Image (cartoon, coloured by chain):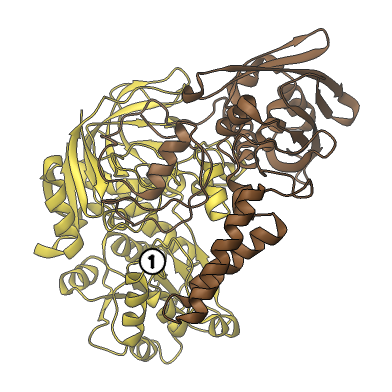
Amino acid sequence: MAVMALERAAAHAVVPHVGPELRSTERWISGLTGGALITAALVRPGGWSLLKLALGGYGLYRATTGRCPVTRSLAIGRGMGTRKEPIQTFATITVGGDPDMLFDRWRDVARWPEWMRFVSAAARENGNVRFEITTPEDLGHTPIVIEGSFVEHPAERLLRFVSADGAPIYFASTIRFVAAPDLRSTEIHVDAEYAIPGGKIGAGMSSLFGGAPDQQIRSDLRRFKAWVETAAVPTTLGQPSGARKGPITRIARVRERLEQGAPLALSEPAQEGEELIELIEVIEIPIEVAS
Amino acid sequence: MRAACWHGKEKIGIERVPDPELLAPGDAIIQVTATTICGSDLHIYDGFIPSMMRGDIIGHEFMGEVVDIGPDVRNLRRGDRVVVTSTISCGACDHCERGRFSLCDNGNPNAAFAERVLGYSIGGIFGYSHLMGGYAGAFAEYVRVPYADVGCIVVPSDMPDEKMLFLSDAVPTGFMGADLAHIQPGDVVAVWGCGAVGQFAISFATLLGASKVIAIDRFPERLRLAQEKSSAIPLDYTNVDLVAELKELTGGRGPDACIDAVGMEAHGVGPGHFYDKAKTGLGLELDRIGVIRQMIHACRKGGTVVIMGVYVGMVDKFPLGIAMNKALTFKMGQMHGQLYGRRALEHVLHGDLDPSFVATHQMTLDGIEPAFEMFKHKSDECMRVVLRP
């Protein structure tokens, strides 16, 4: 449960109403570049004028407002939300089985590593839950330990987690187990809020969750569903494949970067020699890829 | 082991890769005795399928011998001869319990990724992109089969491979197409595409009671086969005004059910086809839906349109108004092989159908690239190539 909140934490780079996202220098550069592009488009109209106008306008927007949705989306290693103004998110899934059984499965903290992708260990200690997340290889497999209160409300089939003061990140989450209309399955609703600090820990968290924790939380919900319904989480890790070297598609290259926990981009330009057959947008989530 | 790996558009290479291992308690390892290039493999070969990675082992239609099983496998023993359903389904989720195996919630390890990209996810498919789970495929000496109890169909040891192999995909796909058409006595069924799936859709349409089946293609040998094996009425769409001809053959009503066994790379004639081809060529569209347009125009009012050919993206020039006002019913989906494969096996064992007639060529796995070329261009009257690892 707790990691769910963490996974959501990198979903949005910066809370939009906590001040300008861009530094003064960036705003000046954006303004000058934007003005130059607009001038060029108006003085020498041509085939690229519309593009120049659009880019120039965006530059002026950055300069005048101090905000940039692209930068926000790309922000890695930057503070995400504050404890006073945390980021909120939610997710849901339907799982076969009655709410009481699923409530019990979820509260079995020691088995979280079986279905929570990034949790390597978890245990109860003095009424709290303490679990460990390991960062990707390029961040040194640094273990991050999170501790917090874990309150169970069996009558309402509800679980709550709130990170302890002094935890590397702030998060609070609520898991509700509601009987589905078919009376043989259960709707699991996760509501969470979080704030990840900047610095190394924040960077580790962001890299860990591939920059899309909302996606990761849904992925873990799916893993929980498979774990309950089939007694195992589906996997391809460890299966054979041919050589991954050589010309690859853009999305494949981005996926490899995601595997390595590298920072992410909203769009990934093609490199020389790559075959541009991929038509879908680059998606910033980790997926399973065979070795 | 040796395996055929995807190296990019129209590039496949044989590589030596590690043997697969059991990764989950419900897994089995199958030594492949026969596999075949499916029409949907061409979409990968031609670079239409997103989320492929260099080095992916492709192929999804196969059979072989069980050489290892995980501790939770109950229905299989080492040495069993099995056909493996090309789709990967858990057998335990709500969709599987309802028999809608291809919609499985748990069979795809990358389901969340698929949901992010597509807005939904379905079960896994062997060797068919990372959106479909990223599972290693069947063009190899060995394959790891997840949920082996669900996906492996044990077949008699005395039946030739060619008679069993297509139960993996082509036969259940054709069967499901005919089944979704809700064929009633007196019905006329038209099937677009006389490749293997189309041939089996025609066969099962006849078996399920259609009074008349019309086979549509442009290759004479395929039309001839449909005529010989299933007494279908052959129709070469390049020589006729197809919709007018279908009306003519049905007293002006149109076929009661129309089945698409072609998919996203449909060929055609006339301006509509060139429009579609231009759009796909420019990357503005992934699917050419000429067949679906024809089906909507031709189908009888209140009739059923069944789509078994694979489509992957969004399309335009879809005659929705005609479909709505004619009150057509649309049925479609990836085939539920775990259901239809087993039912089809009964028909084969009963003698209702011998699927081996589509196996026109035999090659070794090393010849996979020429096999793809031959299959793609339908040269030497190729309908299906059986590959022996």
Q: Image quadrant for the C terminus of chain B?
A: top left
Residue at x-position 34% and y-position 72% = B192
Q: Where is residue A277 shown, x and y percent of the image? A: 34, 57
Image quarter of residue A127 = top right
**What amino acid type should be assigned to the residue bearing mark 1?**
Ala
Q: Can you identify the residue that label 1 sits on?
A: B205
Taking the view exactly as shown, the residue that stands out farthest to the top is A126
- Seen from the viewer's position, the closer of residues B357 and B210 is B357
Give the image location of residue B86, x and y in percent: 37, 44
* Residue B121 seen from this side: no
Please tell me which residue lies in front, B243 or B24: B24
Q: Chain A is drawn in which colour?
A: brown
Q: Can residue B319 be seen in this view?
A: yes
Chain B: what color?
yellow
Where the N terminus of chain B falls, by quadrant?
A: top left
Rendered location of residue B15, percent (x, y): 19, 34
Q: Is residue A225 above or below residue B339?
A: above
**Residue under the image location 33 percent in, 89 percent down:** B245
Q: Which of B142 and B195 is in front in this view?
A: B142
Within 10 angstroms of label 1, few (less than 14), some, or many (20 or more) residues?
A: many
User: Residue at (77%, 43%) from the top-left corner?
Assistant: A180
Circle 1: element type: helix
Query: Where residue B262 sits: x, y (%)?
Result: 34, 67
Left or right, B155 with reference to A215: left
Q: Mark 1 lies on which chain?
A: B
In-image side of B381 versus A54 (left or right): left
Q: In the figure, residue B267 lies in which quadrant?
A: bottom left
